[in-house]
Image (cartoon, rainbow, N blue to C red):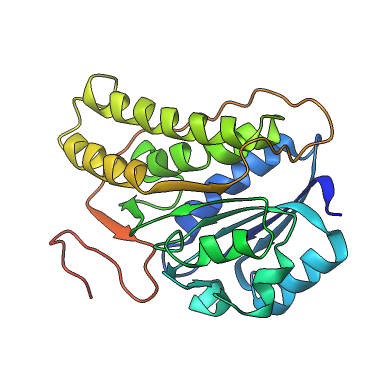
Amino acid sequence: MPNKGTAVLILPSQHYLEYGSCVMDKIAQQFKDKLKIIELRGSDANPSGIDSAIQNNDPMFVFGVGHGNVNIYTVECMTPYMQVCDNRTRMMANRVIHLNSCLTAQQLGPDLVNKGALTYYGNYMEFYLLVRGPPCASKFETTVFDAEYTVEKSLFSGKTTGQAQNDRLKAYDDEIKYWTNGPGASDPEAPIAVQVLTIDKNIAKMLGKDNVTITSGGGVSPALLYAMAALTTFATFGYVSYIGTKHKKV
């Protein structure tokens, strides 16, 4: 059986993926004294490296940010890692999985659960992110991930998978309030942040069991602080495309 208190985090860096990876890395640093966390960053987020990390550590939890489609999850340089009905879906049996990747909740997520994954979190449609400055440089760049990655903050703190999903959805509401009538409301592009957060909340799905914990003991209550800036574009974690300021796929 997978090792409770052990997590593998797949954190690619190219094609806008560093925007999510840098937020997850900050979360990982907060919990590394409580859990065994293996981070695969940048070029290490490749299929053979991921397979090795899972086989050698047998983690209870696997997180991956990446571009995707209804039946596929890709990693660094949009290299395919896992797709419906391949052998790697069976590797996820008895684990909790979170894929922050466009569209995978439609087919890949259900396939993972059917193949034995305990719980799957993912995105039913295209997942949008906000982009202007460098990754993690501003509240605009982190706001969608602050909400989405509440899954990890809750699970790493010892909560159940169902509690983590509830916390995830509440975190989206909290981020929306921040830009609606909180400190971010005066920003001229706050309406775009609200629009993107609303989209991402509506596609934030969970499948499988709601009573699973990934830790072997109690957790801690984490807090993340970020500076504010502004944004000019937003993108998606689609397999081969992104959205720019003119809302045009390229």
- Could you tell me which quadrant the C terminus lies in? bottom left
- Please tell me which residue is depicted at 31% across the width and 25% down the height of the picture: 178
Q: Residue 223: image x %, image y %? A: 57, 26
Is 87 placed above or below 137 here?
below
Residue 142 visible, this angle: yes
- Could you tell me which quadrant the N terminus lies in? bottom right
- Please tell me which residue is depicted at 26% across the width and 28% down the height of the picture: 179
Q: Residue 195: image x %, image y %? A: 22, 42
Left or right: residue 161 versus residue 5 is: left
Report the label total: 0
Dividing the picture into quarters, in which one does residue 201 lie?
top left
Left or right: residue 216 versus residue 194 is: right
Is 156 placed above or below 174 here?
below
Residue 44 visible, this angle: no
Q: Residue 206: image x %, image y %? A: 51, 46
- Please tell me which residue is depicted at 67% across the width and 35% down the height of the picture: 211
- Please tell me which residue is depicted at 33% across the width and 61% down the height of the picture: 236
Dividing the picture into quarters, in which one does residue 175 lie?
top left
Dividing the picture into quarters, in which one does residue 97 lie?
bottom right
